[in-house]
Image (cartoon, rainbow, N blue to C red):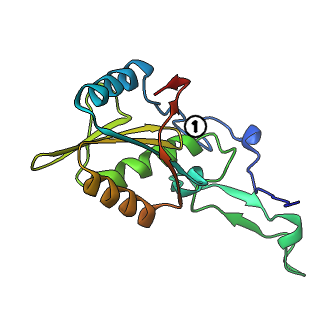
Amino acid sequence: MAFKARLVAKGYTQRPRVDFEETYSPVAMTKSVRILLAIAAWYDYEIWQMNVKTAFLNGFVEEEIFMDQPESFTTVGEEQKVCRLQRSIYDLKQAFRSWKTRFDEVIRGYDFVKNDYDPCIYKKISGSSVAYLVLYVDDILLIKNNVKMLGDIKAWLSTQFSMKDMGEASYILGIKI
């Protein structure tokens, strides 16, 4: 049996316009995913799925946020000190938004272009190769017409984030592929 623990913030104590400004962050629209799946089926593109492990820990915090030290990690004589967060952690009101902002910055660095209509759909064209990337919270769907490009993108994503390669996609958002 394996035990896991996760450090979380007391997001319920955060106050609007004091501890956070924006919390909204989009997710891929189901109709966009369906359109891309139809394109993939028509052109016989590869469809692969990946998961970003601990995605919310990748976002940077814009606001000054302090939290109490976890009880088991305090140093004797320094129990009254607090921690200033530099990165987002689970249960912060802005955690999802921070993650999405970070993902946008990183993915643009690999020449993906965000879709104007759906901000969680990205496209990359390189010669005759085309790749679509769908982000749904921490799940990534990769749709490509070039297997080498698929491998390159997966390898690159794995250098940027801790990833789990889930192989060829069979389900996404409750849609059987």
Q: How many marks?
A: 1
When asked about the image quadrant of residue 78, the answer is bottom right
Q: Residue at x 53, y 27 (%)?
A: 173
Residue 10 percent coordinates (x, y)? 77, 46
- Amino acid type, callout 1: Arg
Is 154 on the left-hand or right-hand side of 3? left
Q: Quadrant of the C terminus?
A: top left
Q: Quadrant of the N terminus?
A: bottom right
Residue 129 percent coordinates (x, y)? 17, 47
Residue 72 percent coordinates (x, y)? 88, 69
Is 76 on the left-hand or right-hand side of 16? right
Which residue is farthest left? 127
Q: Residue at x 46, y 30 (%)?
A: 26
Is 156 on the left-hand or right-hand side of 113? right
When asked about the image quadrant of residue 30, the answer is top left
Is the residue 142 above or below the residue 58 in the image? above
Which residue is farthest front? 44
Local secondary structure at mark 1: loop
Is the residue 24 above or below the residue 150 in the image? above
Viewer-proximal residue, 5 or 48? Answer: 48
User: Dot 1: within a 10 Å radius of its alpha carbon, few (fewer than 14), some, or many (20 or more) residues?
Assistant: few
Q: Residue at x 56, y 51 (%)?
A: 55
Tag 1 residue: 17
Viewer-proximal residue, 115 or 144? Answer: 144
Residue 162 percent coordinates (x, y)? 53, 61
Q: Residue at x 88, y 65 (%)?
A: 71
Is the residue 141 above or below the residue 68 in the image? above
Viewer-proximal residue, 113 or 96? Answer: 113
Which residue is farthest top? 31
Is the residue 13 above or below the residue 162 in the image? above
